[in-house]
Image: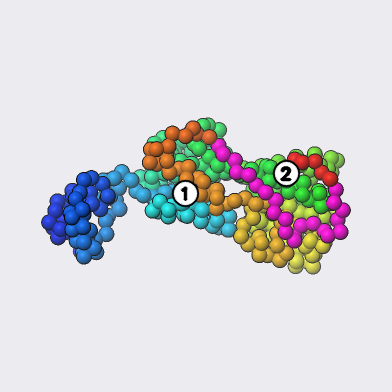
Amino acid sequence: MAVTIHDVADAAQVSIATVSRVLNGVGNVTEATRRKVTKAAARLSYIPHGGARSLSTRRTNCIGAVLPDLHDEFFSELIRGIDRVARLHTLHLLLSCSHSDVDELAAALRAMQGRVDGLLVMSPHVDAEVLSQNIPPSMPTVLMNTRHDGDRYPSFMVDNYGGARAMVQHLVGRGHRRIALIAGPPANFDSCERLRGYVDALAELLPGISPQILPGDFTEQSGHRAGQLLLSMASRPDAVFAANDMMAIGCAFALNEAGVTVPDDLALAGFDDIPIARCVSPPLTTVRVRIAELGELALERLLPAISGSGQEKVCTQTLGTEVVVRSSCGRKQAPMIAVRQV
């Protein structure tokens, strides 16, 4: 049978309450008693029951993270950043995936109740009403790249719009005129902002040139399909801007299959700067999002709310982006032109 707290109390010849205070690090206990209890617990290989400890301390020492997906390097980097801060504070991470479905998001949020001390939520498809219906008012919560209309939740947003504008500016500055966009999912907030940035920058920098928008869904497979589609066009673009790196990589594969060379025949750029972006051939020009830092900052904002020490005003913080220029983008012979800062 499993060793219980009663067994530890008997072995140390102290009360159960004393064992509880020692193991939870609370209450006034002499150093001699503390040593006696910890030695007894070690000798018996006692493992505290998480549920019982939670009832005693009203803390689970767990952080919940609900993400729209767990597949691809963006989410791996995001989780890495969250986990880095969690480990520093000896917290455990409980992950759940909504699969970009509102009903699954609601179920995941409800399932976290009673199991975590606070929530990190990323869901680009929902608004504040969905969140408020499924997150108790007492649950500390921080949003990441999640559209919401109220002022209940602190949030961190990536400057998707500004990043897309900056990339179009870079492509125009390299002499490209026919710039196509592989868009992300139409109902996705990040995707919509990147599309808006592309359209606005194109209208400002190349007035009279119509946008070329190819459908995508942020997956490598959709990028490959978009690459095949642009290869069939009578008038191909001379540069392709994919709304994320995975689609850019899928597109590059389709181009390579057809014998189209990047960047000599066609320039290619992405968005996110996932780790593999610098390792593909040629290395991918992209808009850098500090993905791990997004996870770190979100959890660091959440911790004071959990401990009750934070009195910060609820606000939205926007994380800047930057264009990272690598070999995939820009023909060497293309004339450089001056463009206005956007």
How far across and how far down the image is residue 124, in percent? 57, 44
Residue that appears at 72% across and 55% down: 325
Residue positioned 41% across, 35% down in the render: 137
Q: Nearer the viewer, residue 97 or 177?
A: 177
At x 79%, y 65%, the residue is 261
Q: Which quadrant does the N terminus fall into?
A: bottom left
What amino acid does circle 2 point to? Arg
Q: What label sits on residue 341 in the rendered view?
A: none
Can residue 102 be seen here?
no
Front one among 184 and 56: 56
From the viewer's perspective, is 304 left or right of 324? left
Mark positioned earlier in the residue sequence (1 or 2)? 1
Q: Which mark, by number, is residue 65?
A: 1
Q: How much space separates mark 1 and mark 2, taking CA atoms?
A: 30 Å
- Residue 29 at least partly seen: yes
Quick one: SS at disc 2?
helix
Q: Magenta part mainly helix, strand or loop?
A: loop
> Would residue 218 be counted in the magenta stretch?
no
* Magenta part of the chain: 316-337
Residue that badge 2 annotates: 165
Where does the C terminus fall, quadrant-wise?
Answer: top right
